[in-house]
Amino acid sequence: MSPLADHDRTQVDDIIDRWGGDAEFAVEILQEIQARFRHLPQAALERVSERTRADMGRLYHIATFFKAFSLKPRGRVPIQVCTGTACHVQGSARVLDAFSRELRVRPGESTADLEFSLDGVRCLGCCGLAPVVTIGDELVGGVDSSKVARLLRKPRKPGAQPRAKESRDA
Ligand code: FES
């Protein structure tokens, strides 16, 4: 495990302090750490455990239960391809394959340069626009596989990382 740099450790401590160092807020603390580091570094989990007295097993359970968390670094720009029923019917599997091919990663992975991460997700709540994709903070409807390369060439601001609302098994 590589230790946290002093600056990173201070940021982790600030996050823990914002939540009163209370293990009851472990999910919220981990969400902020995930947003800051784009993953949950092992050393940060150790620090949360040390400062809040939360059991490491519980922290790992949270980190692996919610899809929004990752123990490996995630891309600067998260890409989510909706695979819900309406999007599936409209060909989202082909869209997901096209992103996978263009980026040379599988769903759940990030590109080597940590520019993009790719995930298939459940209904994004705008089925009328199916098939739907979010790229960073932009939602794009009516995507077909022929548009994927062009979508990836567009300059992107980093988007909000997914929130911890969806479990891996949900
Ligand atoms: S199924 Fe894709 S937005 Fe609802």
Image (spheres, rainbow, N blue to C red):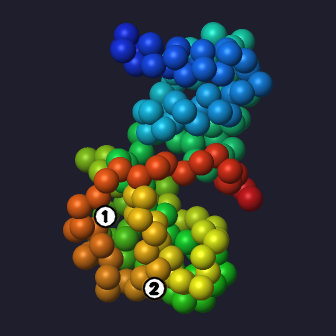
- 20 versus 84 height, above or below: above
Residue at the spot 32% in from the left edge and 82% down from the top edge: 147
The picture quadrant where one finds residue 9 is top left
* Quarter in which the N terminus is drawn: top left
Mark 2 surroundings: few (<14), some (14-19) or many (≥20) residues within 10 A: some
Q: Is residue 45 left or right of residue 153?
A: right
- Nearest to viewer (mark 1 / mark 2): 2
Q: Where on the picture, by quarter, is residue 155?
A: bottom left
Amino acid type at mark 2: Gly
Task: Identify the residue under disc 1.
Answer: 103
Q: CA distance from mark 1 to mark 2?
A: 20 Å
* Towards the viewer: 30 or 64: 30
Tag 2, which secondary structure?
Answer: loop
- Where residue 44 sits in the image (x, y, percent)? 52, 21
Q: Residue at x 73, y 20 (%)?
A: 23
Regarding residue 24, the answer to whether it shows in the image is yes
Which residue corresponds to mark 2? 142
Position of the C terminus, as image quadrant, is bottom right
